[in-house]
Amino acid sequence: MDAAAPLVTRFAPSPTGLLHLGHAHSALAGWRRARASGGRFLLRIEDIDPARCRPDFAQAIADDLRWLGLDWDGPVRVQSAHLPDYRATLDALHARGLLYPCFCTRADIARDIAASLSAPHLAPTGPDGPPYPGTCRHLSAGARQARIAAGQAPALRLDMARALALVPGGLSFHEEGQGRIACDPARFGDVVLARKDTPASYHLCVTHDDALQGVTLVTRGEDLKPATDLHRLLQALMGWPEPAYAHHRLLTDAAGRRLAKRDRAATLRDLRAAGLSAAEVRAMAGNPSPRTPAAG
Ligand code: GLU
């Protein structure tokens, strides 16, 4: 990538809690890169999972970022307001025979994995858990219809083998500072792209929106680096452009544990209430003090 080109970056939190220092680190990473390049910084609320997300947290995210001194370009994209976009992507994949309905419960899947392996604890595990054993992949059209008629709402899974057959040359992505990294999306198996209670998966929505919004550099935590393999596959299947990636380290607490939403003491609200200035919090998030040493 041309280092001088204006970048489009984004911060894409899920409103499942208040922002903590780790989020501030992530938001600052994207904001700084966009502003330094004369590009655009976007804020996207990834609230596709109604069971986990709350509008008051979305509002708190915007308020906390403003307090921190971060600004963003254009309107905030709130994913739950764009369900037809994700539906259209699912329909396009479905029309090409790349999705199939899956009626399995978690218990069904666990049982089928156990039955198919003599030593279940040795099951290969993918980035999102053990790959799906494929139980519903070959259900007949009649069997699918009968289950739907009986009121069973299916999830939609990607037929990974068919999808991979469409990208025979293999996939890779550009990680800043590391160069090209080869992808192995097969590790995800037949990944769920829509659930009965979640209209589209994180993986589908994030790649859709990065493409729609013209994101050129994805800055996010290194915990999401394995997901990039699947994101590149979805981008290739949909003909979407390929952004570059800059996965950053995760902040940890004094005990070396990754900061998580359970760490109330580290929320930006609490730091603010304790009297810290935005500049002090930015410094803590950007240049971790001994209290928040860098991971690994
Ligand atoms: N919404 C995701 C999260 O809060 C981040 C998505 C991304 O940056 O790709 O973990």
Image (tube, rainbow, N blue to C red):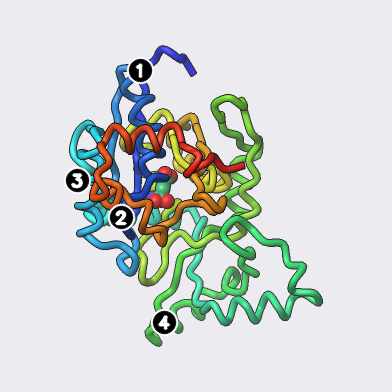
**CA gap, disc 2 and disc 4:** 35 Å
How crowded pointer 1 is (Cα within 10 Å; few <14, some 14-19, many 20+) is rated as some
Question: Horizontally, is 153 left or right of 166 in the view?
Answer: left
Q: Residue furthest right?
A: 118
Residue that label 4 marks: 152
Residue that label 1 marks: 37
Task: Give amino acid for label 4.
Answer: Gln
* Disc 3 + disc 1, Cβ < 8 Å: no
Task: Give amino acid for label 3.
Answer: Asp
Q: Residue at x 33, y 69 (%)?
A: 51
* Disc 3 + disc 4, Cβ < 8 Å: no
Which label belongs to residue 18? 2
Q: Earlier in the sequence, mark 2 or mark 1?
A: 2
Q: Earlier in the sequence, mark 2 or mark 3?
A: 2
Based on the displayed image, in which of its 4 quarters is residue 277 positioned? top left
In terms of depth relative to the viewer, which is nearer, 287 or 156?
Answer: 287
In terms of depth relative to the viewer, which is nearer, 265 or 211?
Answer: 265
The label nearer to you, 3 versus 1, is: 3
Secondary structure type for disc 1: helix
Confirm if mark 4 falls within 8 A of ligand 1: no
**CA gap, disc 3 and disc 4:** 41 Å
Secondary structure type for disc 4: loop
Task: Give amino acid for label 1.
Answer: Ser
Secondary structure type for disc 2: loop
